[in-house]
Amino acid sequence: MFQQVEYIYIDCSYVIIKVLNAKLDNTLTNNIEISVNSATCYKNNNIVLKNIDILLNNREVLLITGPNGCGKTTLIESICGIQNLESGYISLNKVNIQNQECNYLDNILYIGHKNGLNDDLTVLENLEYLCVFDSSADSQNTKQIRRSMEYFNISKYESYMASQLSEGNKRRVALARLFLTRKKIWLLDEPLNNLDEETTKVLIKLFARHQDNQGLIVLSSHFDLSKELNNVKSFKMENQSD
Amino acid sequence: MIKAIVKTELAIYFRNLNSIFLPLIFFFLILSVFPLILGTDKILLGKVIPGMIWITVILTTLLSSNNFFRDDFKNGIIEMYLTSDTSIELVLFFRIIACWIFTCLPVIIFIPLVSLLFEISFQNSAIILSTLILGTPILISIGIFGSALTLGLAKSNILTPVIIIPFYIPVLIFSASAIEAVSIGLPYTMQICILLALLVLVLPIMPYLLKYTLELSINN
């Protein structure tokens, strides 16, 4: 009896260890192609996205611009898969992202207009916790996390609570994830909000580095990045009048 | 990964000692109100107090699980959960367990003291304790499920209890019947086994259900 229980226990723990150790075999290396195919989306019975087609390849930046309330956030949310579309689909390398085989989540990093920080944790703890949700970053690697804080010039706030920070500094902590991740597709919703000029420059440098690493960036902004970066595809959205 | 999750949960609860002590104080306040209303008739109190303890615990769990995801939603952590490539179910499981340890366990620990105060016999007190230990994790996970369900709504303070209290009923029926059985000297193993079965059923399913519910709530 006890032996049997022990066997079951060992089996279970083996499975758990296997699941936890499952490394990213599905990360993309070279070719990335994201396409949005005739995406239509309603929100509260209003049409927000209307037959949108976009094709993006690696080393490209998609800059989504447009007036407030035109659906920039909805478009980015639907590209990252948390907003369902009424019709149309989004595909990664010609595989629908809803498909299990696509392993889409292994390749994307999404930073919304909310920062994703926990108010009761310090900046360092927050970054460690954020790394838990990104299997390409190592949450135990404190040295790398400290480097990311230096990069965004927030080292002195290391032991501050996230609730004590200013909005700009919160944004910088959230963006420090970009330094830590090795994912190829970045989906950023107004990343330049609340940032000062210097940090904007640092961030643009990071974008350029990501492009050199075959990365792909989708971002919405009111700031014209086409002068600072190469391969910028602009996508202008307009308010849907109905 | 598990280490980081556990460390974070501990840090969050220990920095918010309010969230540990307030449910406990609430529990004692409500319990001390009952003798004021019902009078100090020992026979009457002896009959109703086990039920009263259960009702108070229900209110406590409602209080602590009602706004479980509110701050996370406000801060965008839910979106981060849903776009992450690690096992969110595991994180949610640990969060349910942490919520139980820090809000229900303190109350359960004080049950022997409450039994002394109300002169509940040892046997009754033991059965209250065991039904609470088996029942509260179920109540907490259902409460968290309700808070995930009403996440997208602006004003959901009363709505959540209205939705989830019907789901509490199976747990309440079997706990009450176990307490009743003990007080009139009948066997109570069946009720305890059913509670255990409910617990074993609910706990592993709940993280998956929560993930699905969060996806739906975010989609609005």
Image (spheres, rainbow, N blue to C red):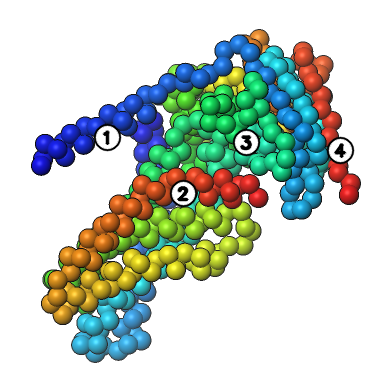
Chain under label 4? A
Callout 4: helix, strand or loop? Answer: loop
Per the image, the residue denoted by label 4 is A238
Chain under label 2? B
Per the image, the residue denoted by label 1 is A12
Q: Is residue A194 above or below residue B182?
A: above
Residue B202 image point, x, y percent: 36, 53
Per the image, the residue denoted by label 3 is A81
Q: Are marks 2 and 3 in contact (CB under 8 Å)?
A: no
Q: Is residue B169 above or below residue A144?
A: below
Q: CA distance from mark 4 to mark 3?
A: 22 Å
Do tags 4 and 3 sit on the same chain?
A: yes
Q: Are marks 3 and 1 in contact (CB under 8 Å)?
A: no
Q: Quadrant of the N terminus of chain B?
A: top left
Do tags 2 and 1 sit on the same chain?
A: no
Q: Is residue B144 above or below residue B45?
A: above
Within 10 angstroms of label 3, few (less than 14), some, or many (20 or more) residues?
many
Q: Find residue B209 and name its label.
A: 2
Chain under label 3? A
- Residue drawn at 74 percent across, 43 percent down: A41
Chain under label 1? A
Q: CA distance from mark 2 to mark 4?
A: 37 Å
Q: CA distance from mark 2 to mark 3?
A: 18 Å
Within 10 angstroms of label 2, few (less than 14), some, or many (20 or more) residues?
some
Q: Label 2 amino acid?
A: Leu
Callout 1: helix, strand or loop? Answer: helix
- Residue drawn at 71 percent across, 25 percent down: A35
Q: Label 4 amino acid?
A: Glu
Q: CA distance from mark 2 to mark 1?
A: 21 Å
Q: CA distance from mark 3 to mark 1?
A: 32 Å
Q: Label 1 amino acid?
A: Cys
Q: Earlier in the sequence, mark 4 or mark 1?
A: 1
